[in-house]
Amino acid sequence: MANSKVKPAFNQQVVVLPIETIVPQKELSLEFRKSTTFKRISASLEHVGLIEPLVVYPRGPRDYLLLDGHARLDILKQRGVTEVRTIFAMDDEAYTYNKKVNHAPPVAEYFMMQKALSHGVTEERLAQVLNVSVSAIRQRRNMLDGICKEAVEILRNRDVSPAVFAYLKKMKPIRQIEAAEHMRATGTHTVRFAKALLEVTRPEMLVEVPSKRKPTIEATSRAAQAMLEQETDLLIRELKAVEESYGTDMLTLSIACGYVERLLSNSRVEKHLDKHHSDILGELRTLLADVKPQKGKSPEVAA
């Protein structure tokens, strides 16, 4: 496995195709055409043009299945565009392509925005391209102000809501790192979770201690608050331990269940257990019934 390489999801060469030869896999709903995402894509195409080529799979001459870029294709068709830049995928379904392509998380978008601003792009221009207000651009521009670099690095590749950083800014750097590690360990990057972490933060770990705090998590005394903090830290440590050993544990369980299944396939062994150790046999059957559905699950195919 050391010499194995990740296969590319698409051909790197860009090919210009007639739009009429591209076959979409789905029709966009009226609700999606009214959404903020659709309007943002439309504004970007109007002011900047097509940056990311469409992804298609060549099924035959003048027959290309669209895998990624349905909104862009729809907008370009509405504007009467006849040709579009594309790249060819290696598989004929979108799941494989999306699994091998990294989409920019919010922190990466922040650095991209900072780079654009440093190269002379105005806030007004960015607002037009992204179909948002100038104030929204300014809020996003200041998203990481007051966040320590260690916390930023932990959350760099995570799908974190920009509003999460507003709560992290109220914590001191060491607590920001702890909170970021909690989010990474639990896989939870929501605003609600960030707010909960802020509420259980000790006053000395806050940038400013409000005169009257109104915690959403009820704590009747300092002792109860301290106990809650200890239980939270213990839970995070346990989650980290489970995360580290999960792969090995599942492999061991699968091998053990395979061995037990082969044993029970022997009618003599099964009859002996049924006669002398029926309780053990029942537990083994229950274990196999619980593990088998987990082994048979397959990842959901992305639309």
Image (cartoon, helix red, strand yellow):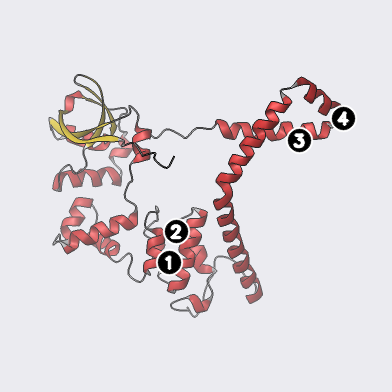
Q: Amino acid at mark 2?
A: Val
Q: Amino acid at mark 4?
A: His
The x, y position of residue 6, in whole percent, is 36, 39
> Of marks 3 and 2, which one's residue comes earlier in the chain?
2
Q: Residue 283 has which mark?
A: 3
Secondary element at image label 2: helix
59 vs 154, left or right, is: left
Relative depth, front residue between 58 and 258: 258
Q: Which residue is mark 1?
A: 167
The x, y position of residue 114, in whole percent, is 23, 62
Q: Residue at x 62, y 68 (%)?
A: 230
Q: Nearer the viewer, mark 3 or mark 4?
A: 4
Marks 2 and 1 sit apart, C-alpha to C-alpha, by 8 Å
Marks 3 and 1 sit apart, C-alpha to C-alpha, by 48 Å
Q: Is residue 150 above or below residue 64?
A: below
Q: Nearer the viewer, mark 4 or mark 2?
A: 4
Q: Nearer the viewer, mark 3 or mark 2?
A: 3
Q: Is residue 29 above or below residue 123?
A: above
